[in-house]
Amino acid sequence: MTLAAAERLDDVALLETADPSSMLRQVASSAAQVREAARVAAETSLDGLAAGGRPRAIVVTGMGGSGIAGEVLAAVAGPGCPVQVTTVHDYRLPGWVGAADLVIAVSCSGATEETLSAAEEAVRRGCRLLGVGSQGSPLARLAEQASAPFIGVKASGMPRSMLWGLSVPLVVAASRLGVLAMPEGAYEAAAEELERVAHLCRPDSEAFVNPAKSLALDLSGTLPMIWGTSPLTGVAAARFACQLNENANYPAIAGVLPEANHNQVVTFDGPFAPGPQAVGLDPAGAPPVPLRLILLRDTQEHPQVARRREESARIAADRGIEVTELAASGDLPLERLASLVQLIDYAAVYLAIAIGIDPAPIAAIQELKARIA
């Protein structure tokens, strides 16, 4: 990373010019999203869903920035959840989904074609349905026609900036249906954690004390391999990769331990790691784009996973691969997830600006949609 790029991140006026769609402000809205979503979801009648008792399974259908809401719900519910929580990123539901199950259709715009297709299929199969998205949208109308509850979401930016506004309604609904227990104050604790991290990562905080700016500068010019150390931080790893893709047009590889130790770790001996194996790609034996290992640590790691994390970091360092460890903070699952996601969301936007990319446009996605319309 050049000095000019680092200086760009510390010039507030340049930051505003390079971020015409105010993606940084959208990230800063996260705490407000949690509070608003929790309030709206609590006020929405779910009597029809509750009348059928606890569902056999919860199937969340959604795409992109909306679709990750299902993974958030599963991670917050945790391995002790008495109900299977699964996410579908497709036009069709799995064959086993039926009347005993709850399908939650999530779409920020309420017009995502894959989500609408899966929701329509849920209605045909007689599943209980809950819609989450924009009021007055095709999804809202579908829910109304099916006499299904709908939780309206007021978009404060791009769908990828609406993680909390789209995820919290699912957690509230699951809690009200007896699928998971949310301690009193859990939503406010998450909101306060988001505010704490946002203060550290604010635009007028210089890179040498701003963890998101520092992370962005460390990532620039590398190929990030991002590993979570629990199902919860695995969701954060996937989120980080997607945010780098969409905000910075930047490639990244996401994984979760222990699975990543059974496949992705072998890239430490490949052409993107420093060492003799890189000879042939560059006369000096340097990889064209060096790997960088990012470990997202959880306070609730399995003891053996903690050992795997430690040894993975040592093996990477032995091969000259730079390693960054980011630790979740807080006690409750939603709070721990918030502590990591807020940091990485800021970092993805800062990386885009540092490398001269407007973080808002998604031209390739729009072109693809136009071609298949």
Image (cartoon, grey):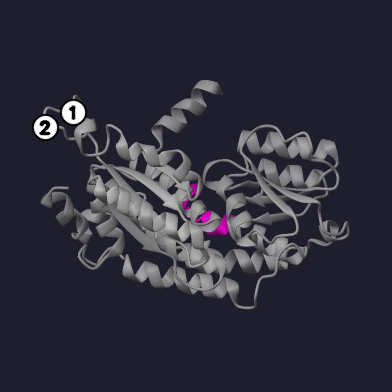
62 vs 178: above or below: above
Q: Position of residue 312 (x, y in %)?
A: 37, 51
Q: Position of residue 279 (x, y in %)?
A: 18, 28
126 vs 306: above or below: above
The numbered dot on residue 284 is 2
The numbered dot on residue 371 is none
Q: Quadrant of the C terminus?
A: top right
- In-image side of 9 versus 303 (left or right): left
Q: Which stretch appears magenta? A: 156-166
The numbered dot on residue 279 is 1
Q: Position of residue 208 (x, y in %)?
A: 20, 65
Quick one: 184 or 130, which is closer to the camera? 184
* Residue 218 falls inside the magenta stretch: no
Q: Secondary structure at mark 2?
A: loop
Q: Amino acid at mark 1?
A: Val
On the image, which quarter does residue 82 sit in? bottom right
The answer to whether any part of residue 37 appears in the image is yes
